Amino acid sequence: MNTPAITSSILLADGVSSASTSSHQMNSPHLEFKNLSVSYGPKVALRQISIQVPKNTVLGIVGPANSGKSTLLKTINRTIDFISTARVEGSVALAGEEVTTMKNVYALRRRIGMVFPLPVGLPLTVYENVAFAPRRIGVHGKAELDEIVERCLRDSVLWDEVKDRLDMLGTKLSGGQQQRLTLARALSLSPEILCLDEFSIAIDPVTTMKIEDVLMQLKEKMTIILVTNLTQQARRMADHVAFLNDSELVEWGENEAMFNRPKKEITGRYLNGEFG
Amino acid sequence: MHSQAQNPFGPTPYERKKERASLIAKVVTFVMSMALVIPMLLIIGLIFVKGWSVISVDYLWENPRGGGIAGGIWGPLIGTFFLTLTCLVIVAPVGVLAGIYLNEYAPDNRATRAIMIAVTSLAGVPSIVHALFGLGAFVVAMHMGKSLLAAACTLAVMTLPVIITSTREALAAVPRNFREACWNLGASKWQTIRTIVLPNSISGILTGVILVVSRAAGETAPIMLTGAAAYLPLPENMPDKLMPYYLGDQFLALAMHLNVIARDVPNMPTEMKFGSALVLLCLILLINSLAIIIRVQLRRRKRW
């Protein structure tokens, strides 16, 4: 990793964050968790979480393993439904609409791009991987699909590596490439919320930086929820940072305040890498 | 032994014992596998040697005459074909769709487990019991009479668990995270099954279906009570010869024909008995090799 690149993105992130938070703070939040609790059988995964995410901002969620970060993401697109023991209480609101009781979960999931840490290339060609979701909602025009595929693969910084072999199986790409393919697929429906769970886990630092730059641009169009184990990544990208520990929201607030003037001592220690 | 004992790098008594045990295990398991293979080769060889002399185009193309003592085996051959085809038309959609339900939709609860136990138990029921069930349910209660349809239905019930189980296994071989990736994109369960799961499990499902065909073609008991005749005069004129049976008719089938000529026809020439057995055997080997070819193809086309 080269230091100049990091510092420049920190500056970029901070610059954008202060501008956008001030202009959007007044609006009602794009995504709001209110007293959200989730349990798997007797095990509590999330306890009374309340966070508001303004439109076109990045919320960084940090916290040690098993603190409920991924569970929080699953409540947003209701994939929590697939875990039969899960019980959800409280509310998740997407642009004012209650998510936990929403009838049409398919429409909901199309509004939310989701990237989980394990890269999954579908057993289709690279092209069809990205065109999968658009096809399912009836986009069939070749020109339109071509445009979507190229845009999403460029946004996920995979285009240059695969542009000459779009008919290759997605499952045959390397781990890091498959992870970017997963990101491209998540972008294919131009979601209003993009949830990233450890998206950079299998990706080299240089490519990660490039993706982070793209994400900062995508923020103009979507709200981003970024779960990360790299506190520096949260520092570079997030407008707000939420710190989860042991199923509870310890605290959340603006990036700068969280890193420099945390209200709780444990937050400062975690964000500075002294506890984990 | 003597030279080994003097060699300081030679095996210790413990090592020699271990090697001897290993050798014994190898020999015993080899002999047991041969005990499996040799009778099979002997049976196939015997049937080939004794039945080869009657095999000719005429033997395959002529209908049996005089109660089976003369002529060929066209009637039973085409009967077996129509029987397995009808059975397949009934059992394949039911079995494959049930397998899809059980693997993709059914919640993991007591009812599902009860269904799976029922499926496994059904597979363990002896074929003569299926025959009696077919006689009671299809021939008598449903007024089908002894007919091709009743026999095909009986075979369908008998082979249903095979298709359900093989379909389930083929579907379960597709990793769950492919499904989750699709659901995350807003695809419905059916869209996911249609676009990702089925295209990647179709070869496995087909293999199961083909194995069912070979089983249905070889069964005697279930069709004996439900519609297969010992002997029938068959039409010799051209279009009728290709389709001699309707669904409501009794019919001849190879397995039944063999059963009859082997026991019930006096003065039956031996080579004709072995000839029928040879044709039945080749038919089933042919169908099974088709299943093997598809399975090999499947392995080569693995997409992840």
Image (cartoon, rainbow, N blue to C red):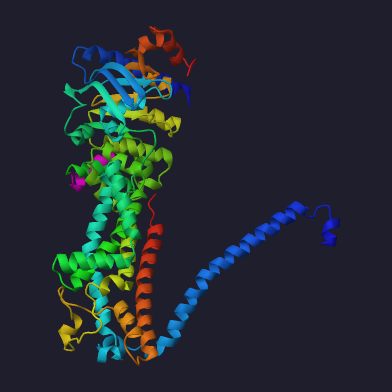
Residue B184 pos. (x, y %)? 28, 36
From this view, report whether residue B102 is shown above or below residue A25: below
From this view, report whether residue B40 is shown above or below residue A230: below
Q: Residue furthest left?
A: B143
From this view, report whether residue A36 is shown above or below residue B205: above
Residue B65 can be seen in this image: no
Picture quarter with the N terminus of chain B:
bottom right
Viewer-nearest residue: A22 or B117: B117
Viewer-nearest residue: A236 or A253: A253
In the picture, measured across the screen, residue A196 lies left or right of residue B191, that is right
Q: Which residues are magenta?
A: A139-150
Q: Is residue B225 magenta?
A: no
From this view, report whether residue A215 is shown above or below residue B34: above
- The residue located at (43%, 8%) in the rendering is A265
In the picture, measured across the screen, residue A135 lies left or right of residue A11, that is left
Viewer-nearest residue: B235 or A220: B235
Q: Main secondary structure of the magenta part?
A: helix
- The residue located at (22%, 15%) in the rendering is A24
In the picture, measured across the screen, residue B14 lies left or right of residue A27, that is right
Residue B4 pos. (x, y %)? 82, 59
- The residue located at (28%, 33%) in the rendering is A79
Residue A48 pos. (x, y %)? 30, 16
Q: In the figure, residue A116 lies in which quadrant?
A: top left
Viewer-nearest residue: A227 or B231: B231
